[in-house]
């Protein structure tokens, strides 16, 4: 092998081969060669090659050598030789080709080629999206510790300020955009790109915001964008950067807003060395709160208040002379506009700024977002003004999220003692995790800030240390409930447990106290949110206090008492039947004879049930994918279904076979109804028209046009050939089916409609939509055919979007919502107009029916019974709930006293003439009566556990019965005193009696009737034995006197009340005495008569008091007719509810904590009975 | 030719190593996240398009997918028994597409959207072949682009002609004015580099190095 021969041999074969390469020279060469190669080229290479016409110089190198050559690993001389050989030897060339190839990689190449071939001609620009996602990474970093991260993050904030130019965008903007001249890009945010631009027509500078492309793709989103922009344009406030116009140019939605030179509050803060002076901070926050209030009054939430969205504008002077600049809020509602229409989006969730985000927003509970959400963010900004840092900071996004959900922020005064108490309290109130505990309106915050600035007392009171501690715990529990719904539960679970354990170590002693405080807060909040119509949150709060085995906190004590059972009973109902098809049931339909129920399910099956028992009769599998609508023919023999495949199918209701099918809509079909006696049918689907069909021939019979959005639901009037339709275009339309024309367009909802219902007489139409409103419509007295405009007669606001509606046959409207709650509104038998205005304002009943949407409601013929279907895949049969409070008054006979001898199964009521009547209170039936002739009774005493009951008359008689045997044991007479109170002592078996116009309490031996003692107590009203029977507490002259019964000596006389004491009660354990008074207070005392605390919250005289049998709660009755329940452990109010009377004179609680008897004005008795509904 | 089969590991689709997730899970490395986004966003986007989504929808869905990953990565417990990371990602993408397709079909259908029904311990079973193909093709494309930047023009052209376009090496050598052996060497070196880049890209290492 020398270079000459190698060089010489290079030229010829190479040239020859290359020339004929296209002709497949190498292939033919290879054909000859490969055979021998296959036979073992390496071993007998020379032999194989020798058969070739031109033997190469020297023997072929081994494969290893060849590989070494290609990899450049051979020594120089070997490399030269191998190279030379390779030039000449086709066999080795073949080998080299193989060695320098790789089959798996080639396979990837092929896949790649296929993919490239299929990809778009013009690959999409993903730069903006990529940058947005990069931002997530910044959220992962601790912005505070990394200046680079912080500044980089800023550039992604959607700011209208100049000067923050992102150079990172590859997409160069066009120099003009419609009438705008682009000056420079300013940044990009969740909404889209932002440019500083000049309006060439009006010759003014604007900040031009271009929407993301996805806004365009979705017509719903686009129309919402325009609508919300219109709303924004209506805002006019010196503290709000104005929105000039919104429009669309070249297929891109844009928003032109006022340009403000800045700086942003964020920039301003960054340049400051010291925290802002508290009064200046308060003034800034006040200005912002007023601006936010202005927007709230226009129905617009900001949703993303943070320092970078606040601009300081020095140009406008005059808002407040003492402020050097005017703070202006920008980007109102933009977070929402960029959001997908359904649910929380990632852009809203994560790309918002967590540090300033309220708990409910961070948790993605979009249904809970309201004005208090913005109040939180305002508080967070104020916090940062005062302390120089946001209230919540975490090391990572998840950490921050966890802190937003769990942690109380450090108290502002930890950073600076210069921050006044009141201002710190205002901040902390804004930052409460629970929206209901914040200022409910920005105006309230503004007012409190103004009070602070004027030096007046504020409403936000500084929290005590214990309160702070207990809140902390409450948060842990609160959050565990919130998080059950969220992603982060796994990550946080560990953290929570760890925190909880640390807490346990820290303070074992106060654990119970904290649990009690958490209980109190939960129950109180539950009562408040229930009153506000939020059934779902009420149930969540109650569930939190329900110990369940297997839960992490199962070792917790069960703290539930009367108040829990009360709220639970309010929010739950008995179902008398249940079916569980499994997946969402979108529509229910009763057969014409009401015997069968058809259910349209998301699993594509049609389920048939016995309408009364919900026993399954048949499951018909369909090809619908999902069935959205179902209807019976008037003859009841056939059923029509409408489904996602756009088909309508007709089924034999008896033999369950498919009779007919046709594609009624090219898109999904939602609803189907029959008319004209079953000869025609109407269908709706994901298009803005309603199609009419001949039920026999299936020929198209017309199209009802008038909606501009998909028609969600159609219903047929029960009395006329009218059809009503609900559409995503926000309107309902009433159609004349005979004339096939539009009769009335019902315009009044602010969002998509999802459901509607005719009243049984056809005179009313109810509509419900995503705007959470239920509206009632009624035509003129001439009926729907009258062309006069149909006006909305009444509207009510639910807490969640309305999903289903049904009228009952007894004058009620049922409304199901997206959260699974059902509400019943009582409209009256005749739906009188006068009563209507208020009728939808508050629900007669509301309860949580489904764990998921309440998709459909159907009223049964039996009064008060109806069915619902839900997103939990269940069908439930309900009966109209019984009032928790029942009142009875048989005649004019006065009821003076009552009590429960054992549990809640018997109630003794003392009536002036009839004597002692014994009721089964749950059934409201009288069992028997204990009576003596010709006695007018006045007071009653029940000896619990001994089956004795005593009653005293107006004329000095005292009679004792054994109530089991109903035998009279004693009867005797004490002068002619009228005993207004008669009380058994628990253990010592004494009777205490208080008579009108006597200055003492008589102590009587019930076995003999003998007077044992007379304890002085001038002008006394009530008395109570201590549970051990050793003492008697009695009121006298506004004071509380305590007697030792053995020595008959007064051991305490406690002053505190400033007016007459109306009632006294010992706690069951004897550690507390409660007194209530005309001075509008209830007080607690120690057994020795020392004041323990005052229970505040009564607006009127307090008339009655009793402890629950477990001693956990104290119940009072007031002159305002309300019953209030106080938490003994925290001494705070838990709950208040109306007794049904104008005043609640006296109260008795049952030993089982589930019953309460009330004597009201007119001396009637009412009975609160709390059923047990799967609560344990 | 037994030694040729050492590259057989590539016939298995590229695997994503566990430490990738471990590193990402710290959620403290924004750079790692950027790289991750740059690497996987186009893939997910193309997959969406392939599954028939419109351009804008594909953007939204791929944003959602990556954001889901970002959220889930902290809680994601990598269990090789449960499947590969690529399948996990594919599952998330496929599920998000399905959800998108079902979204808003009726008012409120699919309302549990968002955090609610996300499960971090998502089973990462086999994903459809379309995803696998997309994944491989994408990784290949990225690797190709990166490798190209590392070589001089002539070397790349030699590889481009002889490997990517199947021009005979001798012909290529003539066109380039280089010896045939040089062309084989170029072809061999670039391919070796491409192989290692593919392995690198599908391993965690890629995520934590700034692309040059």
Image: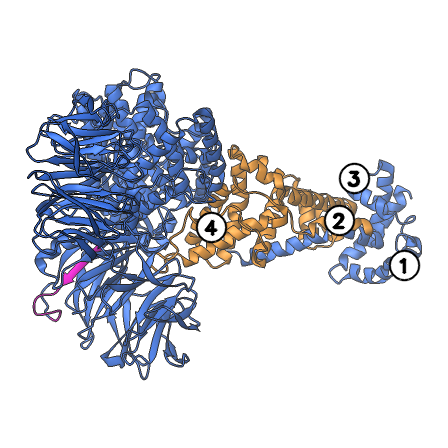
Q: Where residue A124 is drawn, which disc sits there? A: 4
Q: Residue at x 54, y 39 (%)?
A: B35
Q: Circle 1 sits on which residue? A: A53
Which chain is blue in the rendering?
Answer: A
What is the crowding at mark 1: few (fewer than 14 residues within 10 Å), some, or many (at least 20)?
few
Picture quadrant of residue A21: bottom right
Q: Where residue A100 is drawn, which disc sits there? A: 2
Q: Is residue A345 left or right of residue A688?
A: right
Drawing shade for chain B: orange
Residue B50 rendering spot, x and y as whole percentages: 51, 57
Asked whether B119 or A494 is in front, the reply is: A494
Quadrant for the N terminus of chain A, please. Answer: top right
Q: Secondary structure at mark 1?
A: loop
- Are dots 2 and 3 in contact, CB under 8 Å? no
What is the crowding at mark 2: few (fewer than 14 residues within 10 Å), some, or many (at least 20)?
many
Asked whether A260 or B110 is in front, the reply is: B110
Tag 4, which chain? A
Task: Say which label, 1 or 4, has the lower sequence index.
Answer: 1
Q: Secondary structure at mark 4?
A: loop
Q: Nearer the viewer, mark 1 or mark 3?
A: 3
Tag 2, which chain? A
What is the crowding at mark 3: few (fewer than 14 residues within 10 Å), some, or many (at least 20)?
some
Between the residue at mark 4 and the residue at mark 3, the CA separation in whole angstroms equals 42 Å
Between the residue at mark 1 and the residue at mark 4, the CA separation in whole angstroms equals 56 Å
User: What's drawn in magenta, residue-wise?
Assistant: A774-785
Task: Say which label, 2 or 1, has the lower sequence index.
Answer: 1
Task: Say which label, 2 or 4, has the lower sequence index.
Answer: 2
Picture quadrant of residue B147: top right
Q: Secondary structure at mark 2?
A: loop
Circles 2 and 1 on the same chain: yes
Tag 3, which chain? A
């Amino acid at each position: 092998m020398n270079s000459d021969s190698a060089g010489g041999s290079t030229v010829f074969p190479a040239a020859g081969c290359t020339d004929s390469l296209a002709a497949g020279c190498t292939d033919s060469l290879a054909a000859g060669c490969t055979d021998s190669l296959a036979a073992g080229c390496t071993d007998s290479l020379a032999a194989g090659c020798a058969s070739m016409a031109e033997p190469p110089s020297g023997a072929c190198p081994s494969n290893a050598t060849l590989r070494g050559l290609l990899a450049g690993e051979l020594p120089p001389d070997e490399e030269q030789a191998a190279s030379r050989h390779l030039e000449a030897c086709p066999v080795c060339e073949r080998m080299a080709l193989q060695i320098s190839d790789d089959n798996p990689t080639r396979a990837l190449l092929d896949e790649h080629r296929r993919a490239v071939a299929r990809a778009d001609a013009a690959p999409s620009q993903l730069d903006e999206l990529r940058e947005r996602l990069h931002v997530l990474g910044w959220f992962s970093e601790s912005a505070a510790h990394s200046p680079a991260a912080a500044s980089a993050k800023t550039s992604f904030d959607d700011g209208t300020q100049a000067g923050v130019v992102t150079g990172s965008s590859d997409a160069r903007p066009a120099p003009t955009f419609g009438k705008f001249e682009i000056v420079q890009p300013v940044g990009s945010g969740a909404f889209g790109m932002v440019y500083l631009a000049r309006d060439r027509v009006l010759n003014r500078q604007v900040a031009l915001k271009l929407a993301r492309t996805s806004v365009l793709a979705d017509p719903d989103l686009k129309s919402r964008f325009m609508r919300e922009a219109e709303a924004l344009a209506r805002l006019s406030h010196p503290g709000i950067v104005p929105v000039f116009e919104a429009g669309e140019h070249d297929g891109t939605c844009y928003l032109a807003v006022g340009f403000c030179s800045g700086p942003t509050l964020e920039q301003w803060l960054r340049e400051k060395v010291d925290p802002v002076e508290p009064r200046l901070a308060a003034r800034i926050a006040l200005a912002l709160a007023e601006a936010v209030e202005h927007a709230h009054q226009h129905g617009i939430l900001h949703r993303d208040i943070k320092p970078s969205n606040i601009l300081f504008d020095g140009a406008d002077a005059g808002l407040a002379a003492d402020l050097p600049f005017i703070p202006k809020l920008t980007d109102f509602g933009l977070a929402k506009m960029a959001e997908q229409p359904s649910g929380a989006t990632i852009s809203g969730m994560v790309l918002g700024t967590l540090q300033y985000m309220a708990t409910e927003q961070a948790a993605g509970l979009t249904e809970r977002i309201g004005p208090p959400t913005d109040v939180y963010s305002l508080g967070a900004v104020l916090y940062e003004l005062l302390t120089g840092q946001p209230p919540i900071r975490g090391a990572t996004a998840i950490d921050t999220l966890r802190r937003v959900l769990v942690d109380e922020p450090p108290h502002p005064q930890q950073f600076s003692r210069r921050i006044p108490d009141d201002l710190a309290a205002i901040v902390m109130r804004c930052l409460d995790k629970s929206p209901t505990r914040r200022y409910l309106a920005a105006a309230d915050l503004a007012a409190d800030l103004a009070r602070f600035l004027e030096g007046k007392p504020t409403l936000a009171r500084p929290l005590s240390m214990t309160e702070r501690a207990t809140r902390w715990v409450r948060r842990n529990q609160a959050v565990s409930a919130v998080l059950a719904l969220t992603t982060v539960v796994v990550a946080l679970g560990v953290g929570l447990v760890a925190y909880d354990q640390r807490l346990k170590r820290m303070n074992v002693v106060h654990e119970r106290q904290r649990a009690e405080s958490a209980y109190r807060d939960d129950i109180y909040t539950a009562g408040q949110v229930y009153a506000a119509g939020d059934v779902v949150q009420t149930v969540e709060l109650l569930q939190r206090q329900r110990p369940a085995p297997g839960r992490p906190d199962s070792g917790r004590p069960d703290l539930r008492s009367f108040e829990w059972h009360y709220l639970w009973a309010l929010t739950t109902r008995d179902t008398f039947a249940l079916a569980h098809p499994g997946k969402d049931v979108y529509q229910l339909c009763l057969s014409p004879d009401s015997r069968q129920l058809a259910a349209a399910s998301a699993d594509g099956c049609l389920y048939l049930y016995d309408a009364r028992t919900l026993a399954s009769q048949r499951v018909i599998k369909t090809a619908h994918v999902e069935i959205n609508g179902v209807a019976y023919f008037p003859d009841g023999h056939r059923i029509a279904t409408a489904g996602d495949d756009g088909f309508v199918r007709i089924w034999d209701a008896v033999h369950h076979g498919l009779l007919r099918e046709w594609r009624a809509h090219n898109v999904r079909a939602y609803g189907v109804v029959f008319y004209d006696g079953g000869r025609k049918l109407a269908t709706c689907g994901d298009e803005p028209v309603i199609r009419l069909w001949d039920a026999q021939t299936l020929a198209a019979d017309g199209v009802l046009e008038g909606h501009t959005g998909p028609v969600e639901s159609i219903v047929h009037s029960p009395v006329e050939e009218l059809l009503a339709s609900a559409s995503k275009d926000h309107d309902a339309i009433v159609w004349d089916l005979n004339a096939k024309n539009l009769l009335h367009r019902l315009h009044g909802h602010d969002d998509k409609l999802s459901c509607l219902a005719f009243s049984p007489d056809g005179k009313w139409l109810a509509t419900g939509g995503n705007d959470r409103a239920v509206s009632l419509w009624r035509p003129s007295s001439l009926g729907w055919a009258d062309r006069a405009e149909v006006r909305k007669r009444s509207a009510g606001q639910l807490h969640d979007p309305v999903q289903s509606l049904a009228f009952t046959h007894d004058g009620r409207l049922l409304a199901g919502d997206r959260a699974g709650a059902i509400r019943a509104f009582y409209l009256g038998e005749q739906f009188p107009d006068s009563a209507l205005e208020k009728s939808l304002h508050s629900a007669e009943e509301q309860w949580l029916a489904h764990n998921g949407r309440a998709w459909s409601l159907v009223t049964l013929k039996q009064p008060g019974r109806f069915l619902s279907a839900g997103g939990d895949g269940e069908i439930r049969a309900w009966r109209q709930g019984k009032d928790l409070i029942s009142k009875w008054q048989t005649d004019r006979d006065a009821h003076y006293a009552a009590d429960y001898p054992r549990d809640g199964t018997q109630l003794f009521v003392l009536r002036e003439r009839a004597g002692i009547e014994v009721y089964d209170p749950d059934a409201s039936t009288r069992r028997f009566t204990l009576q003596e002739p010709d006695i007018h009774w006045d007071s009653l005493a029940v000896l619990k556990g001994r089956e004795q009951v005593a009653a005293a008359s107006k004329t000095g008689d005292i009679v004792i019965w054994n109530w089991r045997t109903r035998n009279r044991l004693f009867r005797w007479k004490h002068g002619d005193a009228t005993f207004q109170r008669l009380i058994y002592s628990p253990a010592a078996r004494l009777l205490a009696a208080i008579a009108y116009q006597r200055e003492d309490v008589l102590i009587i031996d019930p076995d003999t009737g003998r007077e044992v003692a007379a304890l002085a107590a001038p002008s006394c009203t009530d008395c109570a034995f201590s549970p051990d029977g050793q003492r008697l507490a009695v009121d006298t002259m506004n004071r509380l006197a305590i007697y030792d019964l053995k020595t008959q000596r007064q051991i305490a006389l406690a002053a505190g009340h400033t007016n007459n004491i109306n009632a006294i009660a010992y706690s069951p354990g004897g550690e507390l005495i409660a007194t209530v008074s005309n001075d509008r207070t209830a007080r607690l005392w120690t057994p020795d008569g020392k004041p323990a605390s005052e229970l505040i919250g009564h607006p009127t005289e307090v008339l009655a008091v009793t402890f629950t049998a477990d001693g956990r709660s104290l119940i009072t009755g007031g002159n305002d007719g309300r019953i209030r329940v106080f938490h003994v452990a925290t001494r705070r109010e838990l709950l208040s509810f109306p007794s049904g009377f104008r005043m609640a004179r006296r109260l008795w609680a049952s030993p089982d904590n589930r019953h309460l008897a009330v004597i009201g004005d007119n001396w009637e008795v009412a009975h609160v009975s709390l059923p047990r509904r799967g609560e344990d | 030719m037994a030694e040729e089969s050492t590259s057989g590991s590539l016939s298995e689709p590229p695997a994503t190593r566990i430490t990738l997730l471990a590193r990402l899970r710290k959620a403290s490395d924004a750079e790692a996240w950027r790289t991750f986004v740059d690497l996987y966003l186009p893939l997910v986007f193309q997959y969406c398009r392939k599954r028939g989504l419109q351009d804008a929808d594909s953007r939204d869905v791929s944003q959602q997918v990556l954001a889901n990953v970002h959220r889930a990565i902290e809680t994601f417990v990598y269990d090789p028994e449960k499947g590969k990371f690529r399948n996990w990602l594919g599952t998330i993408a496929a599920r998000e597409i399905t959800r998108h397709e079902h979204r808003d079909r009726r008012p409120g259908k699919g309302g549990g959207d968002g955090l609610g029904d996300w499960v971090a311990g998502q089973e990462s079973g086999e994903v459809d072949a379309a995803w696998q193909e997309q994944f491989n093709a994408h990784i290949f494309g990225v690797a190709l682009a990166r490798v190209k930047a590392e070589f001089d023009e002539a070397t790349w052209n030699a590889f481009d002609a002889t490997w990517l376009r199947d021009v005979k090496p001798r012909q290529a050598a003539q066109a380039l004015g280089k010896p045939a052996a040089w062309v084989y060497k170029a072809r061999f070196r670039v391919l070796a580099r491409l192989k290692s880049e593919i392995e690198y890209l599908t391993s965690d290492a890629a995520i934590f190095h700034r692309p040059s």
